[in-house]
Image (cartoon, grey):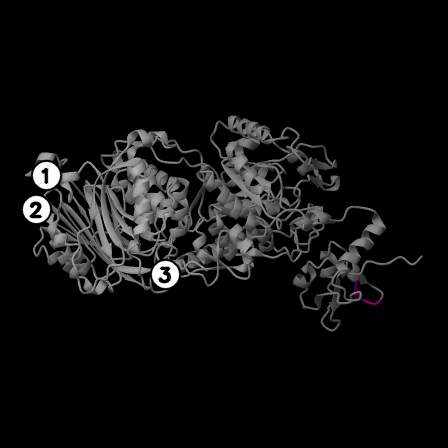
Amino acid sequence: MEKKLIPDKDFRISSSCGLAGIMSEEGKNFSGEAIIKSIATMHERSNGLGGGFAGYGIYPQFKDLWCFHLLYDNEEAKHITEEYLNLYYEIEDDEAIPTRKVANVQPRHILWRYFLKPRIVRMKSTDCAEETEEDFVVKTVMYINKQIDGAFVISSGKNMGIFKGVGYPEDIGKFYRLEEYGGYIWTAHGRFPTNTVGWWGGTHPFGILDWSVVHNGEISSYGINRRYLLNFGYDCTLYTDTEVMAYLFDLLHRKHNLDFEIVAKILSAPFWDEIERMPEKKKEFYLSLRMIYGSALVNGPFAVIVANSTSLVGLNDRIKLRPLVAARKNNFLYLASEESAIREICPSPDKIWAPKAGEPVIGSLKYKITTNDISD
Amino acid sequence: MAKPKVFSEFIVERDEEKCITCQVCCRMCANDVHIYDSETDKVNSDSTKCVGCHFCETVCPTQAIVIRRNLSEPKINAHWTQRVVTEITKQAETGGVLLTGMGCDKPYLSYFDHIVLNASQVTNPSIDPLREPMELRTFLGRKPDRLQITNYKLQITDAKLQTEIAPQLKLETPILFSAMSYGSISLNACMSLARAAREAGTFYNTGEGGLHKNLYDYGKNTIVQVASGRFGVHKEYLEAGAAIEIKIGQGAKPGIGGHLPGEKVTEEISSTRMIPVGTDALSPAPHHDIYSIEDLKQLIFALKEATRYKKPVGVKIAAVHNVAPIASGIVRAGADFVALDGVRGGTGAAPTVIRDNVGIPIELAVAVVDQRLREEGIRNQASIIAGGGIRNSADVVKAIALGADAVYIGTAALVALGCHVCQKCYTGKCNWGIATQDPYLTKRLNPEIGARRLVNLLRGWSMEIKEMLGGMGINAIESLRGNREQLRGVGLSDTDLKLLGIKPAGEAW
């Protein structure tokens, strides 16, 4: 019998979306209620076929452990995955992700979370001895997502997690009881896919390590971006633009050590005529960027909000074909597809603006969070 | 015995009522088809000599001449076609190797004609190139894996590049004129190509004919070729060009060398090629200092040393069965670009049997080479130039989406100069003044007008490419390169689709 193809996993589907992101640059934790309120304002931007959230700073008690959010189709997949995880990680804690019954959300999967510590010796015994712990975690995630049928890692960072499913985002937020968590960065996504989507794994945010990506767009350069990433060992397990975007950020920022500002100029490269007008040194720099990273240029309409444990970044495509609004107030950075979503939770920001095409909005922690800060 | 006669391929039809016996056709035809008979005051035409270049038809002031294909065929036979019979007849007569010019004209499957492009609808806006910027600028050459910079935490302007980028060729449109030597084509044709390359911001290629002294001015837009005969290769020559191309093979004649007959080696060609006047210019089949890949590496680096690592050095090969591993070896040997020439690639002269039967289509070659280089993680180390049968802007877009960085056009450029693809380049009697050294014929090609026509062609194609990109929702050519998601196959087998790395039409993302 021919295998039934799953949208997002086996083929790409187009979708339009609503995005929102909030960050306390001081690292102050606040409940998930605000982000739910913000994304709920943009109800019309989604059609009930996908909603999701990412929160940072939500597991202070396990902040040094890798937290995997898993989505299982059945008990068997869970069993196989746990056996596999046990090979390379000590499972310090695990539990069902707490949910509540919500009328419009039909749970279809087993949702489970694990707090993991890599068994360094075992890790080193594999062929990835030269790699960092992060690279090893990436490999684990890719293995599970590709090889274990019915198991899917939704998020795999430290002190962060992704909560998503099929439904309107405000319902998904309620379903996951997000108001009970405190985090210093929250992002949200409401989806309007062109296909029926049953599988929860394909909804957003997409996560790898502590990256989470919410994305509104359709990438026309997808074909080459995906093949470019393959060059660097990123084997896309899904067929979603968001996954490609997440891996590009991981490659350019984490592996190639490029600042977000530079990453933005690669993904949404300035036009040649703009580069021509730059002073000599700058011109040479941008010329090099485009020559070396041409295949990482993300072409087509998009607005994206990317977060990791220290930053929140908003970015548009090079001609701004999808909406994105930013605002600041009291060391808080707000990002959303529509101004209303920001005004809903922050009626009078100090500054509110529409970022220009290819101009990143970057929020970063003002200081590194220590244990003391979190317990305060 | 009654010897079979070669059927004339064309019939010259002259409308006697329109003909004013001005005799321009008699003066113009290098093949002596038209002869004026003063006794009858009529022009007679010998159809057996006609090559079908349509020059007389073009210059006839009263449109009295029409050249038609000769429909007098032997009995229709799908296997023993007229062409087969003619070829046998010719060889029975002469005992020689049949020669021809231009590219393979056999009806092999054209993959280009079985690939269709994508466009945006609703979920993704298309972009109007008349209103929005649309970028075709392309850089050819070795690129590093990544950028190393210091001070990246500071302003971008303070960031210091640690990565040194190898020399690159900057193209304003991803189309170059492919190698056509001075010798195979006239100086006026070379001049037209050189001027057009300069004006359009791209490059032409000297072929293996050396560089005529009048063309040194165009060095910045010249790729100088080093072929097995090493004709005209010297220090100034290497330094004159913007890049160097080592020619290993050619799509029209993979595996064999070249032959410029002594009659064509005029004073000028002799000094350009550095060979005596009137001697045959024979390029050996292989380079006699390259019998393996490591020898190629030595030549690449010898040329890089000679030019102080200031110019990209590429390698051109004919697309053959093993093209992917060969290209991979070439990149590992240090080439900055690999030019692939498909089975449709043209020539000034080649044995017909070789031209028509050796090599593989460029579409497949580009696809497998691009894929192989990516699998090996070395795709960024060299650019790919695809050539051999590129006919229009759609072919360019398809070749780039399959994985090429840019394309070479040869035949298309000559057609812009007047060529009617009569395939008689090897006779040296080109009425259009292109593939000839006869001063009476070459002066028909005005390099200024020729350059204008070539620039027009590149402009037209570039605008069309922009329209196609805009339709896909893409505004920079680098997002098309290797982006096979934008292609779909129509009427291709599963194996073809797999090799091309594309989905069949009807299949969504």
Between the C-alphas of marks 2 and 3, the distance is: 40 Å
Verify whether residue B42 appears in magenta. Answer: yes
Q: Amino acid at mark 1?
A: Ile
Determine whether the residue tagged by mark 2 lies in a helix, strand or loop.
Answer: loop
Indicate whether A284 appears above or below B45: above
Q: Position of residue A159 (x, y in %)?
A: 18, 41
Q: Which residues are magenta?
A: B40-45
Crowding at dot 2, Cα within 10 Å, few <14 / some 14-19 / many 20+, comes out as: few
x and y percentages locating residue B179 in the rendered image: 59, 43
Q: Is residue A109 left or right of residue B318?
A: left
Category of crowding for the residue at label 3, using alpha-carbon neighbours closer than 10 angstroms: few (below 14), some (14–19), many (at least 20): many
Mark drawn on residue B126? 3
Question: Residue A182: image x %, image y %?
Answer: 11, 47
Q: Disc 2 designates what residue? A: A330
* Tag 2–tag 3 contact (CB < 8 Å): no
Give the number of the disc on residue A374: 1
Magenta stretch containing residue B469, yes or no?
no
Q: Is residue A43 visible?
A: yes
Mark 1 / mark 2, whichever is N-terminal: 2
Q: Of B382 and B257, which appears nearest the observer?
A: B382
Looking at the picture, do discs 1 and 3 lie on one chain?
no
Residues behind callouts 2 and 3 on a single chain: no
